[in-house]
Image (cartoon, grey):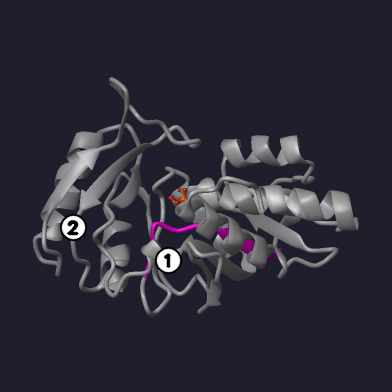
């Protein structure tokens, strides 16, 4: 373990390291995005160097692709790989049903495509990501730039009939400009506080013209590997 990690980074590191033990030679592995997933990519690189593990990764963002190249994890595209054995990724929240909020790092679209095209999805998270009910973390929704204000208004209107505590929505910014995803889209963050019915919300959001995808991952995650600040790991 790297020296001088604070408890949160230690928790992320131990979860990431444990999850890489699920990776076997010959596997095609989806590589998630975010600070926890970055530890996992580094740990995979270490296993490749030290044990001769042979894998190919499919990155879920340009950032992850860059890191994989730096640490020696061979990568390919999803179109080349077609179907994956395993995806390992972080999450912003997970609930008792292993439903997730993802997209805090604005990579939810590629993350959802890659995880869905995998036999198994393992989420790696520090213990603070575990919640009884999703929604405290703002739900990211990827929208196309054309007519984004109309799309945002339609999202707000749609929320009226749903079991949420708040309906505030905001365009995610990068300094003075809207943040652009790898797909050249925008992110609207939904500050809902409580999501009573994540499955219903995920379905209705994706029916709004202009919405590309939302950050609710329902029935996609199989296992959550949880890291704790004292170095313990638990698995759900
Ligand atoms: C990126 C994501 C990340 O997995 C999520 O934001 C968790 O990030 P971190 O591991 O840095 O806490 O969904 O789009």
Q: Is residue 56 left or right of residue 9?
A: right
Q: In this view, which residue lies farthest toward the top?
A: 176
| C-alpha gap between disc 2 and disc 1 | 22 Å
Residue 204 falls in image quadrant = bottom left
Residue 85 on the magenta span: yes
Residue to which mark 2 is pinned: 192
Q: State whether residue 72 is above or below residue 229.
A: above
Residue 54 falls in image quadrant = bottom right
Q: State whether residue 58 is above or below residue 230.
A: above
Q: Which of the marked residues, 2 or 1, is nearer the chain's N terminus?
A: 1
How many marks do you count on the picture? 2
Q: State whether residue 165 is above or below residue 104.
A: below
Q: Is residue 229 left or right of residue 202?
A: right
Q: Secondary structure at mark 1?
A: helix
Within 10 angstroms of label 1, few (less than 14), some, or many (20 or more) residues?
Answer: many
User: At which x and y percent is residue 95?
Assistant: 36, 73
Considering depth in this image, is 1 or 75 the residue closer to the camera?
1
User: At which x and y percent is residue 128?
Assistant: 37, 62
Secondary structure mainly formed by the magenta segment: strand
Asked if labels 1 and 2 touch by Cβ distance under 8 angstroms, the answer is no
Residue to which mark 1 is pinned: 127
Looking at the rendering, the stretch of residues picked out in magenta corresponds to: 84-94
Q: Is residue 111 left or right of residue 1?
A: left
Residue 217 on the magenta span: no
Cβ of disc 2 within 8 Å of ligand 1? no
Q: In this view, which residue lies farthest toward the right?
A: 52
Residue drawn at (57%, 52%) of the image = 37
- Viewer can see residue 115: yes
Q: Is residue 98 left or right of residue 171?
A: right
Residue drawn at (31%, 66%) of the image = 203
User: At which x and y percent is residue 181?
Assistant: 44, 36
């Amino acid at each position: 373990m790297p020296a001088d990690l604070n408890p949160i980074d230690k928790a992320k590191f131990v979860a990431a390291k444990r999850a890489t033990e699920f990776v076997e030679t010959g596997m095609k592995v989806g590589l998630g995005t975010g600070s926890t997933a970055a530890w996992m990519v580094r740990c995979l690189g270490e296993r490749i160097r030290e044990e001769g593990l042979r894998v190919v990764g499919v990155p879920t963002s340009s950032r992850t692709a860059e890191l994989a190249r730096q640490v020696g994890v061979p990568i390919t595209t999803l179109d080349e790989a077609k179907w994956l054995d395993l995806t390992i990724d972080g999450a912003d929240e997970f609930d008792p049903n292993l439903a997730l909020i993802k997209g805090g790092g604005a990579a939810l679209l590629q993350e959802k495509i890659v995880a869905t095209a995998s036999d198994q999805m393992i989420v790696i998270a520090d213990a603070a990501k575990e919640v009884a009910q999703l929604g405290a973390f703002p739900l990211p929704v990827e929208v196309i730039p054309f007519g984004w204000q109309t799309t945002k208004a339609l999202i707000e209107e749609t929320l009226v009939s749903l079991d949420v505590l708040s309906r505030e929505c905001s365009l995610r910014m990068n300094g003075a400009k809207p943040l652009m995803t790898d797909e050249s889209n925008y992110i609207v963050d939904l500050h809902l506080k409580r999501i009573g019915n994540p499955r219903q919300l995920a379905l209705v959001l994706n029916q709004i013209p202009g919405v590309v995808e939302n950050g609710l991952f329902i029935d996609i995650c199989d296992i959550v590997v949880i890291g704790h600040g004292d170095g313990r790991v638990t698995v759900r």
